[in-house]
Every structure is written in C-alpha cells, then in structure tokens.
Amino acid sequence: MARLRPLSGFPEWLPAGRLVEQHVLDVLRRTFELHGFAGIQTRSVEPLDQLLRKGETSKQVYVLRRLQEDHAGHRDDALGLHFDLTVPFARYVLEDAGRLAFPFRRYQVQNVWRGERPQDGRFREFTQADIDVVGADTLPYHIEVELPLVIADAFAALRDVGVPPVRILVNNRRVVEGFARGVGLADVEPVLRVVDKLDKVGPDAVAAMLGTEAGATPAQAAAVLELANLHGADESVADDAAALAARHGVTDEMFATGLAELAALVGAAARRAPGTVVADLKIARGLDYYTGSVYETVLVGHEQLGSICSGGRYDTLACDGSRTYPGVGLSVGVTRLVSRLLSADLVTATRPVPSAVLVAVVTEETRDASDLVAMALRSRGVPVEVAPAAAKLGKQIAYADRRGIPYVWFPGEEHEVKDIRCGVQQPADLHTWTPPADDWWPRVVPG
C-alpha cells in the first residue's frame, strides 16, 4: 500500500488540539451570545456568479461540477464553495428579509475554502467565526464602534488559557478615500488596494504602485504614504491627520466625516478596552465592498502571522433593488489562530480525551459489573469508559495512561479507585464518588 501523505492546506488536529479549538469556539460563541447575536448557518455552496463579485480574490474560489458533469462555459449553472461567510450571509439576508427583525445581529461558525498556496497561518479549508449587524436601509455609526469591542471582550476571555493579548487596528476608508481625492487622485479604488499592501511590500513598492496603478505623482504618493504612517491609541491621531490634510490643502468632506468617525471609535475604545484598539491609517482592506470603518487584529508578539480577525462596514453588499441592507461585520480566523496556539505551545489541554475514569474489567464474564459501574458514574455526569479487554490489571492501567485517563476504577465487593498519576488507591463509594473538579473534564490551560 502506498504511504499516505497529508493533504496540504487541509488541517486536521489531534484530539488535544481539537479540544483547544473547541474551547476557542465555545468562548467566541458565549461572548457573541452575551452581546445578543443569534447563531445561523448557511449552505456551503453559492452560484459562481455571486462569488465572483469579490474582485481580485475570486480566482481562489473552488468551483464544483454538478453530478460530475463538466459545466465549463456555463457559469450561470456553476456552483462554488464559499470563499468566506460574507457573501452567503448577504444572500441569506436578502432571501429572509421579510422574516428577520432589523437590526439583525448574527454570528456564524462554519468552514470556508480558498484555493491559495498553503503557508504558515494560511489554509485551503478553515473555520471562521463571524459576527455582523445588518440594518434595513440605515445602520447607525455606533455599531462600527460596538463590534470591535465585542471582539476585544472575546479575546480578553481567552487570556486565562494562555492566548496572547490582541491589538485591533482600525481605520475608516472614508479617511483614505477623502484624502486621496483631496490631493487630486480621482480613482481611489487602486489607492485603497495598494495602501493595504504597505506592510507586505514596503513604502518604496507602494509608492511605485501608486504611480502605475493609481496615476499618482511622486508628491501625491508621498502624501498618501504620510497619511498611512499615522497611528495612535486615542483621538490625537485624528488631530495629526487633520494637520497633515491642512498642509496638503485637503478640504474633502468625506475625509472630515471619516476622521470624526475614527476619532469617536478610538475614543470609545480607549475608555472601554484601553490599549486594545489602535488607529492605523494604513489599514484599508482590499475588498471593494467596504465603505466605512475597517478592522484588522493581530496577536501581540505574533504580528508576522497576519490578521486573525478582520472586517468592516459595508453599505451595498446586500441590495434587492428597492432596499439596501447596510452592515458591519468581523470575522475571526479560528484555524489561523489555533494553528499558532498549537505550533507555538501557547495553549494545551490537560488530557486528550474526555474520559476521567477507566473502569477495569476483571474477566469477560464480569464485564456486566464494570458496565454497571460506568452507568452509575455517567448518571452523575462523570465521563467514563470501560476497559476494552480483561487483560492484566497492569496492562489496563497502562492503557489508561496512554489515553491520558487519570483514574482507574476497580470493581468488586469493595470498590476502589486509583489516581494513576500519583499511585494513590483508595476505597470509593459507587453512589457518591466523583473526581475533583479539575479532573472532571479536560481543561484548556497555558502551554
């Protein structure tokens, strides 16, 4: 038989890693629900023409053929696996608008697929956890302030198990767009896309691309880069941006509006989550449906991993021709986060299996007695398994040790239980014994 090789870009965690992932998901879900978000799921496939609305990233969509028939050349009938959860959610809102109460607050945890080159933190199949608030025709700006603070709450709740602190980088696309117009750049879409690449390619490359892709003169490119280099954790960053605009003669109304919104966001965050939210004016988000606040989140000390949570304001992604459903959303890259937690030994599980107790089997003829012990323990909520074979007791203890099970129960006229980690064995009452709280279920702890 040929040797099996893992399929690149499709991660599969071992049981202990899955426990870490599940804990992250549980904390996210609990935090989202505390803030009033309702859980939904959407189908995994969408019509290809809808997925191709996403611009430069659409080349990474996995295309499906129905019933293994080749539909090349018939895009109207082609399907694709969803690239992220935003486009499926927009379609969901349009289809169910008559049955939803707006503003609609939703969270969604599902797998998505991207046909890109796998590397550290980048996968072809991965789990996202999204939150969005969508309104009907209007959505107040304070939602753009609220959502990054929900994410700040979620990651604060993960600190106890060893997840590093996060820094949420925020900007407002109106600031970049208004400034670009103010210095004479009429075509702002390439400006936004190019500025968003500053961390990846550096200022010289960005200046060159602003010239070739946006038609910027060296002076215009330098002005845009000056703006992109501004950052700060309080409202003073807005003062710096306003002063820069004044020096360059920028009087654009969109710039002023975006700057006021950005100052409000950073100010609120400084009061509610000090040091967590930072204005960074090079953050633009390359996708063209974002219209206001944009967000990227990095793990402090692991910034090279890239953003583990991103999103922004969108006004026209969901529109049925008569009504528009503007929204604000953020997406946590759960798989990217967990991959770093595991590879850097930042977080671990106290054991890889749920079982707290292995009930020994003296002989196969007495297996029923062991099964009854297991039933009694499970009735009190203790996770238990029964030994797979009536081997020598030493072998059954070794089996429990390999599995990571801390206790072995010896049935008989006088029941006894042994903590195999320290070797202490003592009598146990079948009707009252439970493991200590820390051993009852596996826990996620700092690595």
Image (cartoon, rainbow, N blue to C red):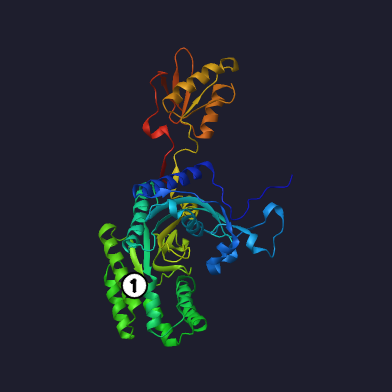
Q: Look at the picture and state if 147 lies above or below 248.
A: above
Can residue 164 be seen? Answer: no
Q: Name the residue: 37% across, 30% down.
A: 436
Numbered disc 1: secondary structure: helix
Q: Position of residue 378 (x, y in %)?
A: 45, 26
Residue reaching furthest to the right: 1
Can residue 348 be seen? Answer: yes
Q: Quadrant of the rendered structure where residue 260 is?
A: bottom left
Three-letter amino acid code of the residue under disc 1: Gly
Q: How many marks?
A: 1
Label 1 sits on residue: 258
Q: Look at the picture and state if 313 lies above or below 366.
A: below
- The N terminus appears in which quarter of the rendering? top right
In depth, the one of 208 and 324 nearer the eye is 324
Q: Position of residue 202 (x, y in %)?
A: 47, 75
In depth, the one of 138 and 227 nearer the eye is 138
Image-based side of 285 in relation to 255, left or right: right
Q: Quadrant of the rendered structure where residue 56 is?
A: bottom right
Image-based side of 360 in relation to 26, left or right: right
Image-based side of 412 in relation to 261, left or right: right
In depth, the one of 105 and 127 nearer the eye is 105
Q: Name the residue: 29% across, 80% down.
A: 243
Q: Position of residue 314 (x, y in %)?
A: 42, 65
